[in-house]
Amino acid sequence: MKNCEQFQEMLSAYIDDLVQPDEKSELEEHLEKCPQCQQELNELQETVNLIRSLQGEELVPPASFRRELRQKLESTAEISKPQKEKRNLFNISKLQAWLPLAAAAVLLLIITPFALDLNMWPTKDSSPEIAMDQKMRTNEMPPRGLAGSDGSGLQSKALEENQIFGSVDVVEEEKSIVGEDIEQKIIKTGYLNLEVDNYNQVTASTKEMVQAWGGYIVNENTYAFGPNQNLLAGNITLRVPHQVFDEALRNIEELGTVRNRSSNSQDVTEEYVDIEGRLKAMRLKEERLIDLLAKSGSLGDVLALENELARTRADLEALEGRLKYLNNRTEYSTINLELRETLTPTQQISTTGFKGIMARTQQAFIKTINTIITGLGNLIVFIGGNLPYIVLGLGLLGSGWQILKKYRKQDEKKG
């Protein structure tokens, strides 16, 4: 059974239609099951299509290409020339010039122990310090592959990639430090169900208070109910700054009789800090990718970096949108208000029962007359529609009455 790496090696031949039929069917079956290999095929196909689109077009290098290439070659030659001369000096003249000195040094090592006190030689206790000092010096020296600037493109690119992903750890550490001092992010929501004497007056007072607090009305819905549709009720969703949330609930409660009340809080501080840290890491990664894209020259590197940059920016937009949502929900608290007008006021004496009494009496009289007329019309329609049944019923009743009278007469004669 082949693994993903073996199948990915066949993708180039598969695009050129050079795969055997049995291997082709096996590869297509694997592509249907493996999203990773399918993505690899799509990216490879995009690269091939891009290269094919460039066929027949003459690629003109930048105007500064030759000058920059010459400077890099000359700098590389200047760096390597002293090293070559030093190597030749060591191979040719070193043995001849330093051979007498080497013999004198050996002789000195043999004679010195007898001429000098042994206490003057370094003891065992000092050797670890020397070794530690050498180790520290070695660690301070930069790696050889990273010292060059112009002639080490691959190594400098690898270093920059390490900086991209290594910076994530640094940002995570900064995030943990910032998280200790950041203010709490709490989403507050409340619900009030009030029974009010005057719906319009209460809604107007509520809107004035919301405006004074620096909040706003999200939506409002009003409808009529009652025997004569003369009462009002509705729902209002309002948002106020979180600092005045408790004050807003208390003040709105005083506008009517509370039938139901609830409030809840959700702490999203941890999520907020996490998103901030991820945003910092993503922005730094985006900057590094842009730098790499500017320095990259091969077509394959450019395509890979552009794909990664597009994914990074998509993640950035998603995180920024979530952060804005959390900021809005925590800075402004939500209160859902349900109002219902009562038929009989409870907070003050009201003469609304006499309001428009003549007009309402007239409407009631007209409504009664219309009801009678409508009833008579329906009766006439009913009689006309059932007239055949009525005639038949009357005929049957008449016949039955005649038969009954006949039997009564016979009974009287017999009696």
Image (cartoon, grey):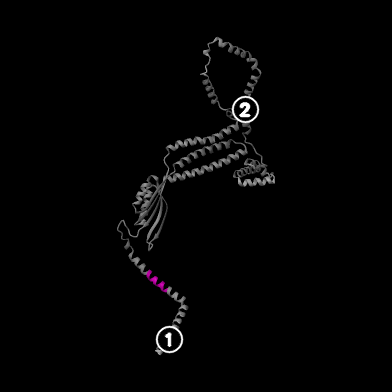
Count how many numbered circles sit on residues in the image.
2
Question: Does residue 53 belong to the magenta stretch?
Answer: no
Packing grade of label 1 (10 A; few <14, some 14-19, many >=20) is few
Q: Which residue lies furthest to the left in this view?
A: 349
Of 380 and 391, which appears nearest the observer? 391
Q: Is residue 177 left or right of residue 71?
A: left
The secondary structure type at the circle numbered 2 is helix
Q: Is residue 197 left or right of residue 139?
A: left
> Magenta residues?
367-377
Q: Name the residue under label 1.
A: 407
Of 150 and 221, which appears nearest the observer? 221
Q: Residue at x 37, y 60 (%)?
A: 231
Q: Which residue lies furthest to the top in this view?
A: 115
Say which mark, if any, is on residue 251.
Answer: none
Say which mark, if any, is on residue 76.
Answer: 2
Seen in the picture, residue 379 relative to 39 is either above or below; the reply is below
Quadrant housing the C terminus: bottom left
Q: Which residue lies furthest to the bottom in this view?
A: 413
Amino acid identity at mark 1? Tyr
Q: Residue furthest front?
A: 415
Q: Which residue is drawn at 48% across and 39% down?
A: 277
Q: Which residue is drawn at 56% across and 40% down?
A: 309
